């Protein structure tokens, strides 16, 4: 088709990876590989690279052996190779500090730009190029759209990340995610006692209700991590996961339950190697409407938004969720 | 964000509606409303407008009383209001015949452009504006992202349409959908005995594996309709639907089963008022990779593509599916 | 086979029916028929007789219009016709007061004997003969083992009843159910603070973990009713029921969740006509071992027994559940 | 309760175990332990003893290394210790050849009597005593009614066995199972072309629709084995099993589908070590009615009886199923 010449500017494709620091790498690997069913694509020294059975990219999860269970980075894939540079240029124009990371900084990944989200200080890394290695033959699937066979509890892809920051910085960070990164606000709530402040906001660049959520931390801290969600195929996979995980010596968070916000089924557990909160997530609705306006949840319905049915989430002061881990600073 | 000025050109947002002609309107309404659980938003004379419980737009299904059970139109929503006109202009430049339809041609809908897909002759209608009426209070949901409560077998939105045309025209039509409408080919297969010809192709403008599929008809006819799919929340909803529909005097097509292509669960049944084939559809994977390359299914794995497990689809000569209904011509 | 002559004595076949008094009969009927999917087999004056789609007997649920939302009777079917009389004789020998009810006292039912469980005062009725009328042709199933088609939320049979009585009477009643009625204790717990007293006991004459449960009431009252459970086919039916019922103006109790005790999935709701607590119940394990010894749940695992995963049950003092309704006296 | 003195005669409690001969013991063990999730309780030389996670008895499956993939025995537990001897005496009176097997013939099992079913020649073994060893601590469950944690595809207990014999012997065998062993006929069909002959009969001593089924073999042979079924918790477990097994190099039989007969969900696969057909089985209805009369399936509904929905079973001449393996003779 003879499209007119234009440059849409840099765009994010999807939330693509996370680097979790873990004081007990072997235990974390057993959790993600043997229980959740992910593939260890590579392991170099104290760093393991994993992906789920519907992911072709080299990894969506990096597990890094280190003393502190912090999140080292939140990775996003951009739509075109030049978008890494175009975003970097935008950050420089805005005075947002950023550093370039060479190809291979994460194994299998091309050049990336790392920066801290203004206000919330979460370390994001944007990249485009990433290898798509074949899985070992012993686990390859006959289904062309699977990189390996379904195994374990059936985790199939990274779904979204959930961030927290202080009440004093959440509005700035949430606005910047929209204005500078192109995220659209899909659903949100305000702090009941301080309605000028966002309690939580669910944002996406895809038709998912959220690729990223950001909300107020229970403590007045920036850079907090609430959870990373991995997608499973059906609500029933959540029930099976709850059944098996309850019977193991793994810290069980909450669930199964169904969110009103997003309409997905959830189970929250904690990686026994690091304590990071991990959500298993299934279903939900998709937004194809180009004129979608963000849905605002208010009291008293807000409780339905968090838990439509099932095991209720633990919430802290002002309805905020309890975070698990801090994030790293600008230098990786 | 200070985005440079540009015009991305007209874009389709999603497959949005279908107008099914039915010789027995009341029976069709009972099927879609009372059994599948859709809402009749409006009915004017012999035309009923329905939507599913996660749809806010005025309708995704039009049922038109008429002698012949043909498909009157396939509706797509475009991203911006001006895209209706921009697409129309593109069609004129290409010599593709098109007609303008005034606002209200379908109740609640704005201006539209109607044209026949070159080669396959399927009547598409592109529109942007559409009303979003509140449901009657008696069926409204407490969940903000539902226009009404889940009812019946739990149909929640139109998912995709599946078209067929002659072996002599399928390549032209499939290429035009990509080149002129912006669909991306996600998975496909060639005719085993004539590999220059597309057996079937699954295409999308969204991260769904397909918003539209097009394949070879068993007979050498253009404009054939295979099915329209409505989405349900979970695989188990497909089992429940099979259980209930098998026990009714409704023509049962095939399923439940899981496609290898797209990885979704399916059940094919026929609207008892019109005989049109309707798919209930759940799950599948989403494509967020901006560098996705279409997956090609070849023999012998192609059989897994059609049916990974479960009740096998009826296929005609050369592996083609059997169509159910013709489509209308250019004039609505 | 040449079996030696013997008389095994009277035996209960299963928990067969319940008569719920309701101040709003029409609303109760709408709940059980239109929402849960039961069949109204007969209605005579202010009394309606209902059954579920896998039940052939005339009814498993009687709804009686009356001012007080009490339980009028708990019905059990005995294995042979003469067992009604044999049980009656046993009660007379034990000094347990009982009255004979003529055939037709409940429509479609043969002669019955009514008595109060010693200690707990719950009014039980034992019968053997019961009509098995065909359903109306419009709802008959093609499946030979279904009396009608699956409809609504898919309730398929009465599963069990759950009773409560005062701490001072629970041991006597629970022992009598075993010694005089032949129930076997399958799982149980003692009051943590008074281990001589049964907190709750799950008993059965069938391979189900319980046909009847009896436990300590939060208040020092006898004859209390906690709930009657109706069985649905799969865990997922519980999720669907939760989704739909949460969105209606019906008092939602607790769930979905999975009991450790019995390993079944549960959802507790309240009949909007009467307020009686109704459990939707799915799955669980069966006991075929003739040497089974009752499993005792102790603190801290007892919490897992009540809720293995999911929405936690409301519990009162000493871990007792909160009852909903009283029961009638000896005279029906 | 003061029960009158009587002896009910010997009774079967349930279908308890099967001894499958396998030419590749290690491969069979990997299938049942690593894929289906069973526990290897003991292994002595070429004989492995396995049980599922809801079974406390020492084993329900014996895998015996041997050249021929035959079934060595079908084990049934009787209700009382003396029933082994009482059944033996009955067989002697009937002239049914039987041999005594000492305690420990199968590890963990008490004394047993082995005999061939008159007509069909299937080698049954009746026993009562069986050890209930604790599982290794590493796999023990917090749920009191589980001997170990749910693992793999979630097989939880042996459900039933399905036998075949020649058209000339099926009536005799089926009648003898009822008359001499106390099985009740629950559902059945006659050979369409020879209605004096039982096509298949589903029989039970428990409320299950069948603990044993027996039908006509495609070939005129006695002692044929069709399958042994293991129970999983929910229909969805069948879907997950189909998904995973389809992707492995394991002979896939048929399914998932739902039987009209018994109303359970099925998946048939073949143990890759021996080729024996294994059914994964979920749900179904229970029979508590003491006056139940066997349901007869006739053409054309019989097809619904075999497959209500889903992947259709392979059937041989006259609607018979295809067997997989022969059984051993009288001497074990």
Image (tube, coloured by chain):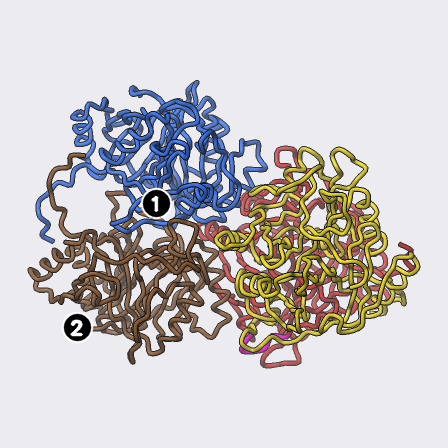
Chain colours: A yellow, B red, C blue, D brown
Instruction: Tell me the SS state at disc 1.
Output: strand
Label 2, residues with CA under 10 Å away: few <14, some 14-19, many ≥20: few
| Residue C234 x %, y % | 45, 49
The quarter in which the C terminus of chain B is drawn is bottom right
The quarter in which the N terminus of chain B is drawn is bottom right
- Vertical side of D69 occupied by C169: above or below: above
Residue A175 shown left or right of residue B174 in the figure: right
Main SS, magenta region, reads loop
Query: Hey, which quadrant is residue C118 in on the image?
Result: top left
Mark 2 belongs to chain = D
Residue D4 shown left or right of residue C139 in the figure: left
> What is the distance, in whole Å, between disc 1 and disc 2 at their CAs?
39 Å
**View extreme (front): residue:** A67
Q: Which mark is residue A263?
A: none
- Foreground residue among D193 and C69: C69
| Residue C228 x %, y % | 40, 34
Mark 1 belongs to chain = C
Residue A327 seen by the camera? yes
Q: Which segment did they paint magenta?
A: B296-301
Residue B39 shown left or right of residue D302 in the figure: right
At x 62%, y 81%, the residue is B194
In the rendered image, residue A290 lying in the magenta stretch gets the answer no
Residue that mark 1 sits on: C295
Residue B43 seen by the camera? no
- Foreground residue among A327 and D145: A327
At x 20%, y 38%, the residue is C80
- Vertical side of C214 occupied by C55: above or below: below
Q: Nearer the viewer, mark 1 or mark 2?
A: 1
| Residue B152 x %, y % | 54, 44
Query: Hey, which quadrant is residue A78 in on the image?
Result: bottom right
Q: Which mark is residue D331?
A: 2
Instruction: Tell me the SS state at disc 2.
Output: loop
């Amino acid at each position: 088709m003879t499209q007119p010449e234009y440059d849409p500017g840099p765009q994010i494709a999807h939330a693509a990876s996370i680097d979790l620091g873990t004081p007990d790498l072997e235990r974390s690997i057993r959790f993600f590989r043997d229980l959740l069913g992910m593939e260890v694509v590579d392991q170099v020294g104290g760093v393991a690279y994993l992906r789920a059975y519907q992911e072709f990219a080299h990894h969506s999860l990096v597990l890094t052996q280190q003393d502190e269970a912090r999140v080292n980075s939140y990775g996003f894939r951009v739509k075109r190779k030049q978008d890494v540079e175009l975003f970097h240029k935008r950050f420089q124009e805005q005075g947002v500090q950023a550093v370039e990371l060479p190809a291979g900084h994460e194994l299998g990944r091309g050049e990336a730009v790392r920066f801290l989200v203004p206000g919330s200080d979460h370390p994001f890394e944007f990249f485009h190029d990433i290898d798509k290695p074949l899985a070992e033959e012993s686990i390859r699937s006959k289904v062309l759209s699977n990189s390996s066979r379904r195994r374990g509890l059936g985790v199939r892809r990274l779904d979204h990340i959930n961030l927290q920051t202080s009440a004093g910085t959440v509005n700035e960070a949430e606005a910047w995610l929209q204005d500078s990164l192109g995220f659209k606000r899909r659903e949100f709530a305000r702090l009941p006692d301080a309605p000028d402040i966002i309690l939580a906001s669910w944002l996406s660049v895809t038709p998912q209700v959220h690729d990223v959520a950001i909300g107020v931390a229970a403590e007045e801290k920036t850079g907090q991590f609430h959870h990373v969600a991995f997608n499973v195929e059906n609500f029933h996979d959540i029930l099976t996961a709850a059944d098996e995980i309850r019977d193991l010596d793994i810290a069980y968070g909450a669930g199964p339950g169904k969110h009103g916000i997003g309409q997905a089924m959830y189970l929250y557990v904690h990686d026994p190697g690091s304590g990071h909160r991990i959500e298993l997530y299934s279903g939900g609705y998709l937004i194809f409407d180009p004129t979608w306006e963000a849905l605002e949840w208010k009291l008293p319905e807000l409780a339905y938004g968090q838990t439509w049915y099932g095991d209720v989430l633990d919430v802290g002061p002002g309805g905020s969720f309890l975070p698990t881990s801090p994030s790293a600073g600008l230098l990786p």
